[in-house]
Structures are given as structure tokens and as C-alpha cells.
Amino acid sequence: MFAETKKKVLVEYPISTVYDALVTIFPVKYYKLRYYDETVHTLTVYDSYNRGFTMRIQLMENTPNTTVINFLTDYPNAIMDLTGGGTQAIEMVLEKLLNQLAKQPKTGVHEAQGSDIEVVDADTFVCTTKNRKHTTAIVTGYVLSILGVVLPLVALINYDSSDSLMATFFVAGIICLAIEISLSVILQYNEDSKSLLHGRIQICICGLTLIILGAMIHPGLAIAGILIPIVAMGYTLQREKAI
């Protein structure tokens, strides 16, 4: 999964109508307009809670009464879009645009034969990020949470400086914990409430585990166990308030 996401769709409205509707709908949750130019029908959008995100929307006239919309999202400083944030942003904006356009009668009819461009409207468009299930990620998160608790505790309880197996258990547990912290943050970034809830539960489990390990090994781990959940959940709570 790369950091760049593209989507091209066609709507059965004139380019001027689509452009005016696009400008009108913003802000869309935490996505806001940074720049728009009516002469070339181009808009640039940013995420008010993630300045490393950009979206470019360009309109092209297909016929006098139909318009092609090109979406391009990118995280310029990232190698991959692990959270699927690009697709999520495109679908949020597109869904709101289609609902806005639905208030007006269609003026064009698209001949679908021979075209690979998706024709969308408010009645047929499905926002996949709202309906997407993350069961595998949730279950994996809890498995990693359990391993992140059990393996280090087993290693500490049975500590022996000459036992390489216990050292391996401890390192493996810490790795599981680190992966789970990242996974729980990704779950909280999704739109569906189930993923958000389980992501918060898992980040709290990780924090509690670090606090326990901090009491047994070093207080720095306990401090991390307090700060990590606060920062992670605080960020998502701020995003929710912006909706």
C-alpha cells in the first residue's frame, strides 16, 4: 500500500455545478480547503489534524453536462498509507459532494459503453470505509496484547541470566507490545465505532502492561505506559470533536 491514492469518477452534472458544490461542502469533518482555482477547476484540501496529508481534486469536462472528477491524496513524508486514510478522505468528500449534487436535477446522461470511469450518484455510491470490517486486525491486536503481557512476565518471573530462552521471551514480548501499540492507533483512525472502541481498549492494555513492567524493571516504562495511551486517545478524541 503506497502513500498515494487515486480515484476517478464521473458525475452527470456540468463542470460549473460540480465545482460550486465542491467549494460549498467544505469543511468536510476535519478536511478543509487550502486553495481553489475556478479557472482550472482545481482544489487542494488539507487535514486540520494531520498536516502531512494533502488532497488534490481536479475537474475535467467530459461533455457539457457531465464531469470527470480526479482525486489524488498523498502523505508526502510517508512510504505507505497504513491507515487507509487516503481512501477514507476521498470517500468522505465524494459522499458529501454527491449528496449536495442530489439536491439538483441531473442534466446529463453518460454513455457507459467503452468507458472505464465509474459513474456515481448519491443513490448508488457506497462508502466502503464506513462498512469495512476490521475483525482480523482487532483479533490480532488482542493476541498481541496477551503475548505482550504474558511473555515479559514469564521471562521476569523465571529470570536467569544464563537462560537464553527467557531472554528471547522478554524480547519477543516487547516486540509484540510495540506492534500492538501501532495497530491500536491504526484501529482508532478508522471511521467505524467498533474499531475505534477496540483500538482504545487495546492501547489501554498496552499502557497497563508498561506500567506493570515499569514497576518491575524501570520507572521510565511506567511513564511511557501513561503517556502513550493519553497521546493516542487524545489525538483521536480531538478528531472526533471536529466532526
Image (cartoon, grey):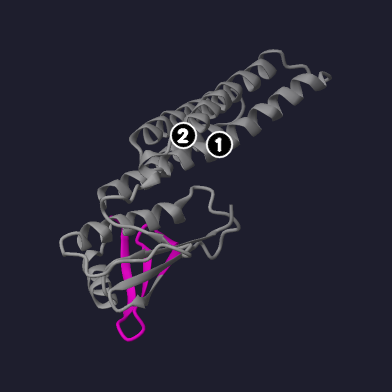
Residue 31 position within the rendered picture, expressed as x and y whole percent measured from the top left: 33, 61
**Left or right: 47, with 5 as reference point:** left
Main SS of the magenta part reads strand
| Residue 17 lies in quadrant | bottom left
Front residue of 130/201: it is: 130
Q: Residues within 10 Å of mark 1 (few under 14, many from 20)?
A: few
- Locate residue 156: give its quadrant: top right
Q: Which residue is mark 2?
A: 134
Span of residues in magenta: 29-56
Q: CA distance from mark 1 to mark 2?
A: 33 Å
Q: Amino acid at mark 2?
A: His
Query: Residue 35: within the magenta?
Result: yes
Residue 56 visible in the picture: yes
Using the rendered view, name the quadrant where residue 3 is placed. bottom right
Category of crowding for the residue at label 2, using alpha-carbon neighbours closer than 10 angstroms: few (below 14), some (14–19), many (at least 20): some
Q: Is residue 4 left or right of residue 132?
A: right
Q: Is residue 227 above or below residue 39?
A: above
Residue at left 29%, top 76%?
A: 15
**Which residue carries the number 1 mark?**
220
Mark 1 and mark 2 lie on one chain; the one further toward the N terminus is 2
